[in-house]
Image (cartoon, rainbow, N blue to C red):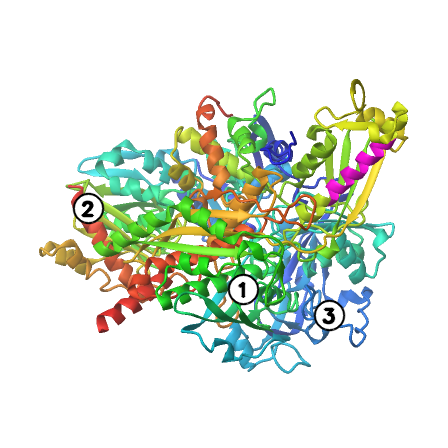
């Protein structure tokens, strides 16, 4: 009986629960003994020219070892201008550069509140905060560009040498001909609001430069990519850089690689010759770490009176903040996944990326796909309301049928496997959809203050979008029979150590307790890609699986030699972890014996696995919300999901990912928003103001099982990390709107705060009164 | 994230606390610290001296007095929640205390600290206003009593003179202790009130509807004049000037004040 | 000033700046780094410890205020033989942690909750944890862990 698919508790937990994890701020290594602290001086204004800076007072403050500014960066060679034609592609998840280039320390101009302008190096962090306050910077204010409208109006341009605030435009011009022949057409502009990823551990890094080598500890999702970035920026050979990932307190896409602040820490360690440590505060994190989402979407949907959707248009304006760090990649993914799980004949998509004087935008759990799903799911409900059909029925009529896979959408995505209608039916049954509608009807009939809303979302999403980049795994079995996995994946809560050990035990019969998993050290794992885009199990895990198969075959050869038998007669008993000649179990050899016989290095397998294609998990969510129609307050009372990511290797880990994803998705629908005022000042820059969701706002979730394996990899696995978020947001938004739809309300933008819901109710009821 | 440097002093008696305060104009009293320290950590408050009065356990009590309940200023929210005296005599106060912050905050924060901080968005100022409490302050010149209506002067501003220490809150025993309600309207359970209403009998006080806690006098008059709870509540927002912020504009808050006052009056009535 | 705190049963004394926060005293003076700093507005609860038996946010307590007091951190929860406290054991059994950053504070808040309310309902658990933010788990398994730990936790004295 394989251990795969069984409930296994995590190997990571005893340490985390008793001693606590070792995050960057917890490192107590000899190399960091006496490390000084980095504190950044950050711009308090959204848009300004820096006309002067006085660091004298700061330099004289207690404990100050150095104050570093742009003037000190003469040891950095600017990168050569790109060869014509080799510029960063608009669709790449890379900074656009060129005239939109982002400096390390702000050079002459600041473009968002929180942009780093100087660094103070002190003995301890308390002194750092004091000294940073003493750096005096003269800002000549420029008008702040805030919001999509402001950016498009181009009254002020953020970048010299550009003609607009729109660095990327892509897609088809609108052509209404696709809506010809539709009985019903609905168009609306909706908002997918800016969010803060807010991992519980903010950004942090420590660095030591000695004997020409840089050792760098960082809270990242990719040690190898980090090394590559540092090498390029610092002009060093990667071989003299060692990047180590300690425990990481969450990432959610905002810790992919390293950003300018973290790079500056490495630079400063080389510049000053001191070991340094930087741990940002939460207030810094709220403006200094990248934000997520921030799209304005114009959706247009048309179809027949009996519920068939014929045409859909999605026009996205992506606010990318002050610097286009991801070029046009996020809206590219949004457009790619625009049709969701629906069979829609005609689709048009277009996107523009705009810069504004706000924190730069980058990936945040779902990275472009929650936006796509939120748009199409709102569109489906708007269409359903327009034709007066139940939203579940409209979805059923348009879901791609199970016999159509692999299915290529008009937007160019090829979905591998799926059974969308079954997922929808499962959650409707689990939720008791009919009973919920009946209860809703009863409350409407009575005119209850507390109204019930039922919201649906059916989704499909793309995981391992960069399957071609693959992942690495090295597996060794030592002479004592223990195994070690060196993985290119980089867990920051996902439990890979447990799952990879399960894969080894399943294939080789070496018990999990004897399997050590190592990640995130470029000296030990020079090649690897890391964890994001829900790629790790289907790339990193499959790499481990293949390495195990390789070790098994090596073991077979060695055991055959020991038994003096033919390889074909050898079999591995995975229950006991022993090799034997078929039919003669009494004479068996352990992995320890086989590995010893193999030689001093034991058995070693190294796999660089490239995925053939991305995979497409899918599912359906049903959210049940209660809305107090006198105050506008919405409460989520039930949330039922089916999230199908193919074969489940670890049910415990998969459920945990679904729960966490659902919570963040619910949070976007109900509560969270990064808000800026018209001058570009963030109004939600502390956790007292940013409405991060707590246990008190959530019910326990009802998870339904669904496993439709992929054909893309031998394990049949897809990625689960972001699916819950993608499905949850539109289900909850739809539920809140549904609760008050009997008043004529068709849409409420997220987050559906009490004030927003009340405004919709107030307007609708005064409309009703006016009739 | 770290307060600016200051000097820490510790008082072992009320007298010592007053002496230390008199010695330093820029000194502030530190009780539970859950109003003051958060401000200091964001460097919005930068006192040069903190006088820790947290060990004056003599100022932590809930006593059944002569026609009134006496609450020591250093009684924590948690102690208010657990008080048997309050459970029977002043359930409004016990319940309101249970709605402040979270359990960790309630283990440290004190009623005195909350009242002296005088944030109109805090819960207890409105409650003591609804209860017509008398605040007892000790200063270099002796002790004096200040009615709740005179205590809250403005945003974060009270009638306390520099160097004065709030020592006791004296609350007249309500005729019908059970005729209470506390409606705290928030986005999340942990949040400060967007709007709150405290009702004890015919007294209605509002949270976050102005620069100080406010009595909804027009609603009280209507109720006293025989109006139903809902009709009286229609006047709840009169004379208020609620803020506009990311949680709602003043119009929404005024609407909430009316709705919540109606609910509070109905709930208070239903308990008797 | 000189501050002396009994941490997990052992006295820790040092001369520290007056403004030293208790959480930094624990992390940097007592060298117990499990307790984490997750915010600067007393919101997140990652720094929760027991101070004289009650849960507090140690980022909003001065070390000086804790002078002479007893503090228990998550490192002090296991019993003398190293066996995990029922709350720790339940968090593991129920997969109540992922990245682990919020976990020490969450566990201490749960220990305090169960000491004050030995048989909480699900709703009471959720409300009691409103001051402890987690970004990874969605709270679902944390709540399960606390409910699962309740019977055994009432048998276990802490500190």
Residue A88 shows which numbered tag?
3
Q: Position of residue B31 (x, y in %)?
A: 42, 42
Q: Is residue A351 above or below residue B88?
A: below
Q: Position of residue A494 (x, y in %)?
A: 62, 43
Magenta-drawn segment = A543-557
Q: Is residue B106 above or below residue A384?
A: above
Q: CA distance from mark 1 to mark 2?
A: 53 Å
Image marks 1 and 3: residues in contact by CB distance under 8 Å: no
Q: Is residue A93 above or below residue C75?
A: below
Q: Position of residue C102 (x, y in %)?
A: 55, 42
Q: Position of residue C91 (x, y in %)?
A: 54, 33
Residue in view at x 67 percent, y 35 percent: A502
Q: Main secondary structure of the magenta part?
A: helix
Q: Chain of mark 2?
A: B
Residue depth check, mark 1 versus mark 3: number of the one nearer the observer: 1
Residue A339 shows which numbered tag?
1
Disc 2 target residue: B268
Q: Chain of mark 3?
A: A
Q: Chain of mark 1?
A: A
Q: Is residue A591 above or below residue B200?
A: above
Residue in view at x 45 percent, y 49 percent: A425
Is B164 or A216 nearer to us in this picture? A216
| Residue A272 found in image quarter | bottom right
Q: Is residue B21 left or right of residue A12?
A: left
């Amino acid at each position: 009986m394989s251990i795969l698919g069984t409930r296994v508790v995590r190997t990571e937990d005893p340490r985390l629960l008793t001693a606590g994890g070792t995050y960057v701020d917890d490192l107590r290594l000899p190399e960091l003994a006496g490390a000084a602290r980095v504190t950044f001086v950050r711009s308090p204004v959204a848009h300004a020219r820096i006309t002067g800076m006085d660091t004298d007072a700061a330099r004289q403050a207690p404990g100050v070892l150095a104050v570093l500014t742009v003037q000190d960066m003469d040891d950095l060679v600017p990168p050569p201008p790109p060869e014509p034609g080799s510029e960063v592609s608009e669709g790449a998840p890379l900074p656009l550069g060129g005239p939109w280039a982002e400096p390390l320390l702000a050079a002459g101009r600041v473009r968002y509140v929180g942009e780093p302008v100087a660094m103070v190096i002190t003995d301890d962090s308390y002194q750092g905060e004091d000294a940073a306050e003493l750096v005096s910077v003269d800002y000549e204010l420029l008008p702040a560009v805030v919001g999509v409208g402001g950016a498009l109006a181009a009254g002020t341009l953020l970048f010299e040498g550009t003609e607009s605030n729109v660095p990327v435009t892509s897609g088809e011009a609108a052509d209404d001909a696709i809506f010809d022949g539709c009985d019903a057409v609905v168009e609306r502009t909706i908002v997918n609001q800016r969010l803060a990823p807010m991992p519980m551990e903010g950004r942090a890094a420590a660095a030591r430069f000695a004997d020409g080598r840089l050792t760098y500890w960082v809270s990242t999702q990719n040690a190898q990519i980090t090394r590559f970035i540092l090498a390029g920026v610092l002009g060093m050979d990667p071989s003299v850089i060692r990047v180590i990932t300690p425990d990481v307190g969450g990432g959610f896409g905002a810790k992919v690689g390293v950003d300018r602040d973290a790079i500056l820490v490495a630079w400063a360690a080389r510049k000053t010759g001191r070991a340094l440590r930087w741990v940002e505060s939460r207030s810094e994190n709220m403006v200094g770490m990248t934000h997520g989402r921030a799209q304005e979407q114009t959706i247009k949907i048309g179809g027949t009176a009996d519920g068939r959707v014929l045409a859909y248009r999605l026009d996205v304006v992506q606010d990318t903040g002050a610097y286009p760090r991801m070029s046009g990649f996020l809206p590219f993914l949004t457009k790619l996944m625009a049709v969701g799980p629906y069979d829609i004949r005609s689709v048009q998509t277009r996107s523009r990326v705009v810069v504004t004087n706000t924190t730069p935008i980058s990936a945040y759990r779902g990275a472009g796909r929650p936006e796509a799903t939120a748009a199409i799911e709102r569109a489906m409900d708007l269409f359903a309301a327009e034709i007066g059909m139940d939203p579940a029925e409209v979805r059923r009529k348009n879901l791609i049928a199970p016999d159509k896979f692999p299915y290529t959408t008009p937007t160019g995505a090829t979905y591998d496997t799926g059974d969308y209608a079954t997922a929808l039916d499962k959650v409707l049954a689990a939720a008791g959809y009919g009973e919920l509608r009946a209860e809703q009807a009863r409350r409407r009939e009575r005119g209850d203050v507390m109204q019930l809303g039922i919201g649906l979302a059916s989704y499909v999403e793309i995981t391992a979008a960069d399957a071609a980049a693959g992942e690495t795994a090295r597996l060794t079995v030592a002479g004592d029979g223990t195994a070690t996995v060196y993985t290119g994946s980089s867990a920051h809560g996902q439990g890979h150590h447990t799952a990879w050990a399960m894969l080894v035990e399943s294939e080789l019969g070496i018990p999990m307790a004897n399997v050590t998993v190592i990640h995130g050290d470029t000296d030990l794992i020079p090649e690897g890609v890391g964890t994001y885009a829900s790629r790790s199990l289907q790339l990193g895990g499959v790499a481990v699986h293949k390495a195990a198969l390789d070790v098994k075959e090596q073991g077979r050869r060695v055991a055959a030699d020991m038994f003096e038998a033919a390889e074909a007669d050898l079999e591995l008993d995975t229950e006991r972890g022993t090799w034997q000649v078929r039919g003669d179990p009494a004479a068996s050899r352990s992995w320890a014996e086989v590995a010893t016989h193999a030689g001093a290095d034991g058995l070693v397998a190294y796999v660089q696995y490239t995925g053939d294609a991305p995979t497409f998990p899918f599912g359906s969510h049903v959210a049940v919300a209660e809305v107090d129609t006198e105050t506008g307050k919405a409460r989520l009372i039930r949330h039922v999901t089916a999230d199908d990511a193919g074969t489940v290797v670890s049910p415990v880990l998969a459920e945990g990912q679904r729960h966490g994803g659902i919570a963040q998705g619910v949070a976007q629908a109900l509560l969270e928003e990064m808000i800026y005022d018209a001058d570009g000042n963030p109004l939600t820059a502390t956790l007292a103001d940013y409405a991060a969701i707590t246990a008190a706002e959530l019910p326990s979730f009802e998870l339904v099982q669904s496993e439709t394996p992929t054909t893309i990899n031998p394990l049949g696995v897809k990625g689960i990390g972001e699916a819950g978020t993608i499905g949850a947001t539109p289900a909850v938004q739809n539920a809140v709107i549904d609760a008050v739809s009997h008043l004529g309300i068709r849409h409420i933008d997220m987050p559906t705060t009490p004030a927003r819901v009340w405004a919709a109710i107030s307007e609708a009821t005064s409309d009703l009164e006016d009739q | 994230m770290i307060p600016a440097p200051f000097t820490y002093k510790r008082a072992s008696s009320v007298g010592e606390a007053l002496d230390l305060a008199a010695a330093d104009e820029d000194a502030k009293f530190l009780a539970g610290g859950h109003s003051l320290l958060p401000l200091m950590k964001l460097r919005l408050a930068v006192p040069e001296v903190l006088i820790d009065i947290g060990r004056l356990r003599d100022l932590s009590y809930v006593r059944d007095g002569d026609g009134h309940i006496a609450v020591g200023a250093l009684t924590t929210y948690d102690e208010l929640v657990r008080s048997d005296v309050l459970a029977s005599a002043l359930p409004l106060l016990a319940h309101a205390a249970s709605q402040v912050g979270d359990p960790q905050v309630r283990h440290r924060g004190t009623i005195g600290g909350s009242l002296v901080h005088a944030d109109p968005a805090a819960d207890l100022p409105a409650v003591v206003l609804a209860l017509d409490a008398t605040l007892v302050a000790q200063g270099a010149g002796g002790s004096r009593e200040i009615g709740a209506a005179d205590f809250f002067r403005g945003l974060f501003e009270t009638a306390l003179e520099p160097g004065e220490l709030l020592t006791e809150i004296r609350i007249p025993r309500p005729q019908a202790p059970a005729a209470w309600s506390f409606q705290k309207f928030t986005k999340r359970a942990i949040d400060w009130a967007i709007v709150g209403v405290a009702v004890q009998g015919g007294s209605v006080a509002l949270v976050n509807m102005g620069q100080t806690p406010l009595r909804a006098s027009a609603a009280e008059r209507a109720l006293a004049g025989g109006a139903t709870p809902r009709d009286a509540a229609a006047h709840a927002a009169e004379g208020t000037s609620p803020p506009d912020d990311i949680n709602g504009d003043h119009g929404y808050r005024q609407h909430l004040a009316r709705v919540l006052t109606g609910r509070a009056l109905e709930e208070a009535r239903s308990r008797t | 000033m000189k501050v002396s705190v009994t941490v997990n049963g052992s006295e820790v004394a040092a001369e520290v700046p007056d403004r030293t926060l208790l959480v930094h005293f624990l992390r940097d003076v007592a060298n117990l780094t499990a307790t984490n700093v997750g915010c600067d507005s007393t919101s997140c609860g990652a720094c929760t410890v027991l101070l004289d038996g009650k849960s507090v946010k140690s980022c909003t307590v001065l070390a000086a205020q804790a002078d002479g007091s007893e503090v228990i951190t998550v490192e002090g929860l296991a019993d003398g033989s190293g066996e995990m406290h029922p709350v720790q054991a339940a968090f593991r059994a129920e997969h109540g942690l992922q990245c682990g950053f919020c976990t020490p504070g969450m566990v201490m808040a749960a220990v305090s909750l169960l000491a004050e309310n030995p048989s909480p309902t699900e709703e009471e658990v959720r409300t009691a944890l409103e001051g402890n933010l987690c970004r990874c788990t969605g709270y679902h398994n944390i709540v399960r862990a606390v409910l699962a730990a309740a019977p055994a936790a009432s048998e276990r004295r802490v500190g």
